[in-house]
Amino acid sequence: MAKVLAVLSSGYSNEEHNYVTGWWAEELFEPLAELEKAGHSVGLASIDGGKPVVDPLSLDSAYDPEGKYKKLYDSGIADKTTPVVDVKASDYDAIMIVGGHGAMFDLAHDENLHAVINIVHETGGIVSAVCHGPAPLVFTKTKDGKPLLQGLKVTGYPNDMEPEEVDGLLPFSLEDEMAKVAQYDKGEGQDEHIVWGSDRLLTGRDPGSSQAFGRELAKKLSELEKHQLDKHLE
């Protein structure tokens, strides 16, 4: 059983524009289901700890027509998270950054999160992120000062999918920032899109890619576990 750390935005609000955002429900719950189905365990963290703010739109009937994610959210699954500063990164085999616009505000430049990402990566774990979740990966630098994503193939939420109502409210363009340091691929014409940038870096494009993203991460972790067991038995 692999241990995965799922990191969520604690939330962001702009009262002047009546704008509230946070983590996106589908992007936690779909990968979580795939990981647990494969027998892996998932711990939750956020910048502030406690109950992080879910993007209310992700529970709206337009994005959750069957009420599946609202039911999961109301069950309290994501009510308790560990502050990122208190996370022992070496305990985890993978880190999964959950998307939602909130990630661009509080996760992107958080140095404690960058440190956790680096430790997971340096100790042979998998670094993964979906939708706007790659925001902190863009700004994470390895111990030798190079961008973590430098030269790697990645995906994430593209400019042409951003809704008009967030125009001027976001701190940066995720696609533009990713393209500065990595080989950005939005998966033109594909309903879902996930990319392995290396054998330890996985990114998913959008909410609709969440299930495939979770399935792929779960599969890779199971393969790594089997490989380690086989080596132990030799």
Image: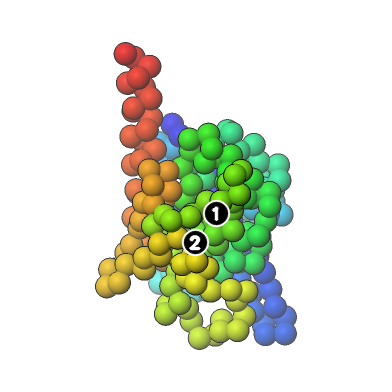
Is 13 positioned to the left or the right of 63 in the image? right
- Which residue is drawn at the image coordinates 58% and 33% (left, top)? 91
Location of residue 69 in the rendering, given as x and y in whole percent from the top left corner: 47, 62
What x and y, as percent, mark residue 7? 57, 52
Q: Quadrant of residue 2?
A: top left
Instruction: Report the amino acid beneath label 1.
Output: Pro
Q: Pick the residue in front: 12 or 58.
A: 12
Give the residue displayed 36% in from the left and 51% down from the top. 196
Relative placement, left or right, of 79 versus 92 is right
| Residue 161, position as x, y percentages in the image | 42, 77
* 153, 193: nearer the viewer: 153
**Gap in angstroms between the C-alphas marked 1 and 2:** 7 Å
Q: Can residue 219 be seen in this view?
A: yes
Q: Residue at x 47, y 70 (%)?
A: 175
Count of marks, rendered view: 2
Q: Going by the picture, which residue comes out furthest to the left?
A: 189
> Disc 1 or 2, which lies upstream in sequence?
1
Q: Mark 1 points at which residue?
A: 147
Q: Do the residues labelled 1 and 2 touch (CB within 8 Å)?
A: yes
State the quadrant of the C terminus: top left
Label 2's element? helix
For disc 2, the marked residue is 181
Q: Image height check: is 65 above or below 35?
A: below
User: Looking at this view, is 73 or 91 the one in front?
Assistant: 91
Question: What amino acid type should be assigned to the residue bearing mark 2?
Answer: Val
Mark 1 lies on a secondary structure that is loop
Position of residue 78 relative to residue 87, above or below, is below
Q: Quadrant of the N terminus?
A: top left
